């Protein structure tokens, strides 16, 4: 498929999980001229959201085309995290077409990302509408953390490759936490900037030093490495 994208999509949020994508979807969807879907290509069959996996339509392009056909918003998009690509690699076909733009969302602090994944596994709280982490803590093996950081870097490079040659906009979890670049992303999507609202907020209220049980061990392992700055208090980015 070349030329105009017959799916009706104009953008996709390409990212890893636990990077603030649900918050970004909610922000963008609050704009009157943007319709932003969530994870259309999730692998969870029990999802309550609109999803390809629960649709009788077998072709992802046809599925999205029918989903977006009634819409009149200027910008129409969805989020495409790596786990969706793994579950439905054929979903990459919906990125084709000259009109598609890529919003590349990433989380710079990979220690905070790893802690978020572990907290999710511990508390089963995926987002703020389900509660918060409270006083929950996690232990992180330093050698495993370093391996995760290197693997995450590889995953981010793969996602960067999906944006190569396409109009793309870079935004980070840290930007969202600080309320930054929201006007710029609206400009990128060709809509007039307005104040955006989200249904979600940060679910971790304690700094990493209080969340990670073996903080001194992690600190010693990261000192002197390219990852040392992950030790900074990311909650100051509010």
Image: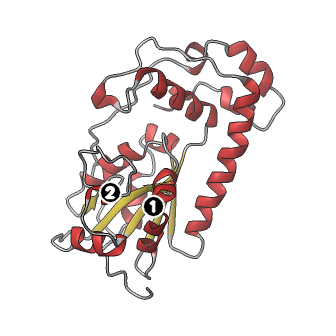
- Residue 226 sits in which quadrant? top right
- Quadrant of the image for the C terminus? top left
Q: Is residue 104 above or below residue 141?
A: below
| Mark 2 surroundings: few (<14), some (14-19) or many (≥20) residues within 10 A | some
The percent position of residue 111, horizontal first and vertical second, equals 63, 31
**CB under 8 Å between callouts 1 and 2?**
yes
| Mark 1 surroundings: few (<14), some (14-19) or many (≥20) residues within 10 A | some
Q: Residue at x 24, y 56 (%)?
A: 31
149 to the left or right of 6: right
- Residue 53 sits in which quadrant? bottom left
Residue 88 has which mark?
A: 1
Kindly identify which residue carries mark 2.
Answer: 53
Circle 1: element type? loop
Farthest residue to the right: give it.
224
The percent position of residue 180, horizontal first and vertical second, equals 45, 46
Q: Residue at x 68, y 38 (%)?
A: 148
Mark-to-mark CA distance, 1 and 2:
9 Å
138 to the left or right of 29: right
Circle 2: element type? helix
The percent position of residue 210, horizontal first and vertical second, equals 57, 13
């Amino acid at each position: 498929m070349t030329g105009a994208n017959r799916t009706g999509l104009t953008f996709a949020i390409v990212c890893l999980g636990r990077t603030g994508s649900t918050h970004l979807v909610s922000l963008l969807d609050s704009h009157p001229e943007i319709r932003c879907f969530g994870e259309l290509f999730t692998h969870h069959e029990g999802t309550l959201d609109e999803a390809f996996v629960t649709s009788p339509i077998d072709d992802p392009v046809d599925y999205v085309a029918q989903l977006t056909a009634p819409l009149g918003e200027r910008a129409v998009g969805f989020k495409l995290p790596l786990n969706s690509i793994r579950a439905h690699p054929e979903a990459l076909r919906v990125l084709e077409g000259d009109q598609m733009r890529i919003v590349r969302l990433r989380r710079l602090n990979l220690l905070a990302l790893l802690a978020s994944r572990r907290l999710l596994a511990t508390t089963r709280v995926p987002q703020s509408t389900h509660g918060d982490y409270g006083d929950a803590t996690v232990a992180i093996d330093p050698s495993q953390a370093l391996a995760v950081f290197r693997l995450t870097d590889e995953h981010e490079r793969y996602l960067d490759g999906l944006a190569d040659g396409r109009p793309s906009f870079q935004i980070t979890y840290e930007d969202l936490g600080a309320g930054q670049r929201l006007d710029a992303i609206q400009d990128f999507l060709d809509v007039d900037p307005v104040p955006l609202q989200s249904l979600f907020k940060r679910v971790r209220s304690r700094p990493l030093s209080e969340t990670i049980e073996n903080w001194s061990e992690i600190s010693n392992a990261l000192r002197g490495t390219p990852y040392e700055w992950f030790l900074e208090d990311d909650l100051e980015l509010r």
